[in-house]
Image (spheres, rainbow, N blue to C red):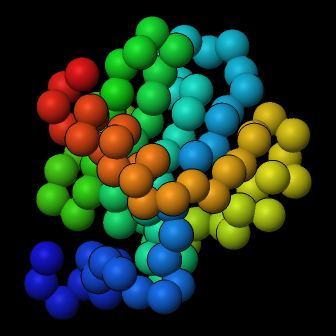
Amino acid sequence: MGGDARGSIGRVSGYFQRVQWRHDDAEDPVVLWAQVVDGWEVRKVDEFADGRLAWADGEHESGSTRLGVVPVPRPEEIAVDTQFVVEVVDELAFERVWLRARRGA
């Protein structure tokens, strides 16, 4: 990953989040999973209503799923918008969906 600080994993300021997005557009994901380090997404999975999973990291994008180009708002900032339900999750929960997405499940 070179010298990009966003690729660093395991920093104290890192966390994993699951954001349920309440909407009716079948083209947009309904659950947004992300590993956030120092305010930046370093890995993410978008989960769609039909069960599809799309993932992105510093070296891969799938469809419209890509890492953000601006820092991620803190979970409490995201939760202010009632269309989002935010949960900070543990690493195991994120890794499970990450592996499913990578396997193409």
Picture quadrant where residue 72 is located: bottom right
**Quadrant that contains the N terminus:** bottom left
Q: Quadrant of the C terminus?
A: top left
Q: Is residue 95 above or below residue 65?
A: below
Height in image: 78 above or below 36?
Answer: above
- Decide: is 81 above or below 105: below
Q: Residue at x 62, y 15 (%)?
A: 25
In front of the other: 105 or 49: 105
Q: Is residue 2 left or right of residue 62?
A: left
Q: Residue at x 26, y 57 (%)?
A: 57
- Left or right? Give the position of 93 relative to 61: right
* Residue 66 in sight from this viewpoint: no
Q: Position of residue 17 (x, y in %)?
A: 56, 55
Tell whether 101 sits left or right of 93: left
Numbered-mark total: 0
Q: Nearer the viewer, residue 81 or 53?
A: 53
Decide if residue 78 is on the left or right side of residue 7: right
Q: Position of residue 21 (x, y in %)?
A: 67, 33
What residue do we see at 51% from left, 59% from top? 90
Q: Where residue 103 appears, x then y in whole percent?
A: 15, 31
In the depicted view, which residue is nearer to us: 12 or 50? 12
Residue 15 visible from this viewpoint: yes
Question: Would you identify the image quadrant in which residue 71 lies?
Answer: bottom right
Question: Looking at the picture, how far across and down is residue 16, in whole percent?
Answer: 51, 61
